[in-house]
């Protein structure tokens, strides 16, 4: 029994007490509670795991890993997990102490100050809107393989048939996600949780079915490199680093579990658990799916491995009927992934607008009294996502470059949290929440590892490889160096606007500000804007 519980005090009373404690913690950050606390443990776990979305990521990127690293690219999966685990552990300490909406933005602000916080939020928000479009495009990879009926534009053989059809399918999905997210977090969480439940059941079943069709051992599959990298300066290591992008593109977004902190019960305790459970479960499920796919595919050297990806493996190994059942599960996974990505983007935009750190902040931060959620950010993010999709119709290569860059921006946004946190540790002024999640004496080495990992992988993701940033058509230097150019423009351009315009207006908007009241007197005067 907790210290504050007493005779006659039931679970409901204790839950209300914990919610009050979390509301008080929110008040310490300067915000008054506005969002409805309706989410439980599984809801927050489901939000994190659906953002990572193992079925979406593995089915969308398996072909890439095999193309550039051969089956041995599988080893990049545990490598990326170990690195991201260091980041997640740092986030767990922050989630326990600051369970607040727009977690990356608010954590960067608390660790590095308002300027670092704005840049981290800006990078994450921009990347999230591009990621929303990129995930929505995954419908095109799966639905037409289930039935040709889903190829609404042409027959799929025309120059732009697939790209245009991808935009159509993706736009319908984003419209659905926008409506669900606008109608409130409870509806989103119910659909998301049901979808995650289906995804988890399907993923475990897929592992079992593939395991039943194993035709070779790990020593054969996990050492096969197809001779890639031979004749190159770095040999196979260079090829492996390129292939590792297939894993790095999947294992992120676990912070979403904490971004819903203002809408969750007891988030200080549950959010750290949800972050770790989402990441670890995703790693284990993904590792077994990829492993057994390589062990079960009829021909390990089939060209379709690097073109059809996991969809080809499932259909070739399990047959059309059983295979299509699993492909429908992938469609469900893509759907809830889009829901989670947009939900995270909405909370981030709301958090920044609440601090008057975005244009029209008052409108963006307005919480609908009917639905209990910020509706304008939901609509705005949905519209931007569709606009970004349209770029894919005639310029699919440029879109793939921008998508890759969006992932890098998320890794950079994570660094804008872990680096200031490390500096605080070195100065001795970081203290985890008393009684909450704490790394103890492992805090410093884990934080150092998180920063080193984030820096190394960001450089690996951004490296000007022609096969990633200029895969088809004539070679252009601005495409190969697109990561550095695009991120530079977004970061410098955005920060210049903030520095010269928005920072002079920064401060918690009056309608969102927490005001302490003296029982014997009037409300305390509001704090001045942060400059």
Image (cartoon, rainbow, N blue to C red):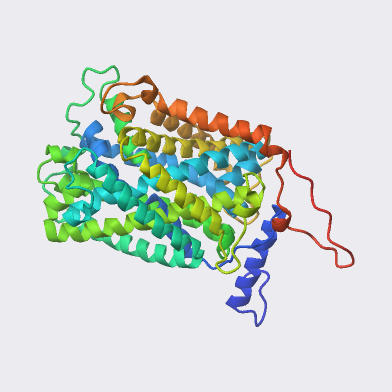
The picture places residue 105, in percent across and down from the top left corner, at: 58, 45
The picture places residue 404, in percent across and down from the top left corner, at: 38, 36
All told, the count of numbered labels is: 0
Which quadrant: the N terminus?
Answer: bottom right
Foreground: 110 or 101? 101
Residue 496 shows in this picture: yes
Q: Relative to 13, does residue 530 appear above or below in the rendering?
A: above
The answer to which image quadrant residue 202 occupies is bottom left
Which quadrant: the C terminus?
Answer: top right
Foreground: 482 or 473? 473
The picture places residue 7, in percent across and down from the top left corner, at: 67, 81
Left-right relation of 316 to 51: left
Identify the residue shown where x is 14% and y is 46%.
297
Identify the residue shown where x is 57% and y is 53%.
437
Q: Relative to 236, does residue 391 appear above or below in the rendering?
A: below
Q: What is the residue that sits farthest to the front in this orientation? A: 154
The picture places residue 473, in percent across and down from the top left corner, at: 26, 26
Q: What is the residue that sits farthest to the right in this orientation? A: 520
The answer to which image quadrant residue 236 occupies is top left
Left-right relation of 207 to 281: left
Left-right relation of 162 to 388: left
Left-right relation of 39 to 509: left
Q: Relative to 449, does residue 105 appear above or below in the rendering?
A: below
Foreground: 427 or 328? 328
Q: Relative to 408, does residue 100 appear above or below in the rendering?
A: below
């Amino acid at each position: 029994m907790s210290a504050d519980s007493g005779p006659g005090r039931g679970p409901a009373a204790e839950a209300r007490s914990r919610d009050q404690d979390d509301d008080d913690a929110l008040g310490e950050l300067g915000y008054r509670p506005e969002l409805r606390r309706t989410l439980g443990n599984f809801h927050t776990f489901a939000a994190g795991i659906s953002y990572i979305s193992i079925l979406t990521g593995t089915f969308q990127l398996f072909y890439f890993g095999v193309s550039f690293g051969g089956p041995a690219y599988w080893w990049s999966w545990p490598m990326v997990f170990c690195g991201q685990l260091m980041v997640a552990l740092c986030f767990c300490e922050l989630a326990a102490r600051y369970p607040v909406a727009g977690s990356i933005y608010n954590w960067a602000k608390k660790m590095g100050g308002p300027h670092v916080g704005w840049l981290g939020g800006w990078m994450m928000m921009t990347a999230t809107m591009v990621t929303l479009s990129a995930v929505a495009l995954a419908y095109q990879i799966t639905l037409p393989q289930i039935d040709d009926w889903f190829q609404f534009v042409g027959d799929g053989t025309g120059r732009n048939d697939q790209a245009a059809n991808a935009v159509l399918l993706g736009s319908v999905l984003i419209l659905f996600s926008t409506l669900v997210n606008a109608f409130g977090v409870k509806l989103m969480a119910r659909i998301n949780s049901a979808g995650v439940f289906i995804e988890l059941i399907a993923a475990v079943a897929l592992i079992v079915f593939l395991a039943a069709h194993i035709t070779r051992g790990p020593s054969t599959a996990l050492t096969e490199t197809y001779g890639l990298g031979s004749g190159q300066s770095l040999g196979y290591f260079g090829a492996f680093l390129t292939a590792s992008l297939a894993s790095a593109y999947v294992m992120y977004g676990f912070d979403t579990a904490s971004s819903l902190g203002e809408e969750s019960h007891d988030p200080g305790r549950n959010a750290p658990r949800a972050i770790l459970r989402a990441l670890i479960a995703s790693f284990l499920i993904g590792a077994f799916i990829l492993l057994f796919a390589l062990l079960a595919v009829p021909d390990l050297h089939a060209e379709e491995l690097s073109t059809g990806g996991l969809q080809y493996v499932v259909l070739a190994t399990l047959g059309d009927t059983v295979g299509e059942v699993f492909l429908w599960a992938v469609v469900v996974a893509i759907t809830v992934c889009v829901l989670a990505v947009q939900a995270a983007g909405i909370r981030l935009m709301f958090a920044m607008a609440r601090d008057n750190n975005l244009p029209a902040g008052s409108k963006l931060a307005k919480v609908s009294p009917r639905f209990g959620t910020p509706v304008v950010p939901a609509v705005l993010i949905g519209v931007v996502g569709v606009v970004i999709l349209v770029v894919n119709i005639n310029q699919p290569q440029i879109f793939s470059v921008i998508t890759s860059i969006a992932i890098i921006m998320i890794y950079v946004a994570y660094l804008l949290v872990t680096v200031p946190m490390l500096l605080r540790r070195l100065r001795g002024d970081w203290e985890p929440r008393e009684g909450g999640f704490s790394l103890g004496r492992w805090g410093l080495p884990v934080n150092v590892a998180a920063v080193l990992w984030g820096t190394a992988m960001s450089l690996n993701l951004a490296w000007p490889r022609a096969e990633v940033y200029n895969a088809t058509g004539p070679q252009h230097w601005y495409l190969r160096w697109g990561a550095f150019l695009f991120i530079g423009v977004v970061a410098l351009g955005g920060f210049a606007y903030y520095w010269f315009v928005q920072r002079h207006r920064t401060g918690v908007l009056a309608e969102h500000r927490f005001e302490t009241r003296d029982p014997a007197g009037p409300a305390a005067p509001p704090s001045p804007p942060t400059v």
